Image: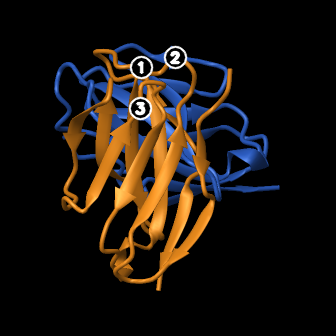
Chain colours: A orange, B blue
Amino acid sequence: ETGVTQSPTHLIKTRGQQVTLRCSSQSGHNTVSWYQQALGQGPQFIFQYYREEENGRGNFPPRFSGLQFPNYSSELNVNALELDDSALYLCASSLSVPQGGIQYFGAGTRLSVL
Amino acid sequence: DAKTTQPNSMESNEEEPVHLPCNHSTISGTDYIHWYRQLPSQGPEYVIHGLTSNVNNRMASLAIAEDRKSSTLILHRATLRDAAVYYCIPRGNTPLVFGKGTRLSVIA
């Protein structure tokens, strides 16, 4: 059973650019969630995809968007990067169950915006 | 989302038990109590979850108060590898809402 993998591990961008982060879900999982973790804070929920449809969104602007593919891999896209977007971006995959499926996290992508 | 209160930090000696408390007085009747931990430079990792009765797994035990307004994560013998930030998260089939958690330090 392969775990959740994210790429790249580190990324440096400048303000105003666009970025795409990638996530490969754990085998058999139909749900992927993305989180942003600023330094010294807990992860904050960005959005969730279930069977290729957005299925919930946190308090993030529309310039944060995503995709989930038929093989359940996923992308997080951020347009018009701002300095405050510098953070660790975490992807988690799970099965959707009533009591809340266990989420399996990748190691994250650290994004620095200069 | 239920609001949680956890100590900012705790310290334990290696090979001693650790009790990590969490208050969640506004938890709904159907929310499970989940615990995750985040080791340095890693993503969060599932530890344990439960609804009403106490739960055990290979990593830890979870003791849930009878009124469900609080819970305690128990590490039976802390090791250096258990040094992490521990998050208590009441939830149903909803995204995880992380607070600031408890930073556990383990002393050799």
- Is residue A107 among the parts visible in the rendering? no
- The percent coordinates of residue A47 (x first, y second) are 29, 45
Q: Is tag 2's residue or tag 3's residue first in the polypeptide sequence? A: 2
Q: Is tag 1's residue or tag 2's residue first in the polypeptide sequence? A: 2
- Chain where mark 1 sits: A
- Is residue A54 among the parts visible in the rendering? yes
Q: How many marks?
A: 3
**What's the residue at 42%, 67% (across, down)?**
A38
User: How many neighbours does mark 2 have within 10 angstroms: few (below 14), some (14-19), or many (20 or more)?
Assistant: few
Gap between marks 2 and 3 measured at Cα: 13 Å
Q: Amino acid at mark 1?
A: Leu
Q: Amino acid at mark 3?
A: Phe
User: How many neighbours does mark 1 have within 10 angstroms: few (below 14), some (14-19), or many (20 or more)?
Assistant: some
Taking depth in this image into account, of B4 and A53 the one nearest to the observer is: A53
The residue labelled by disc 1 is A95
The residue labelled by disc 3 is A69
Gap between marks 3 and 1 measured at Cα: 16 Å
Check residue A28 in the rendering and tell me which mark sits there, or answer none.
2
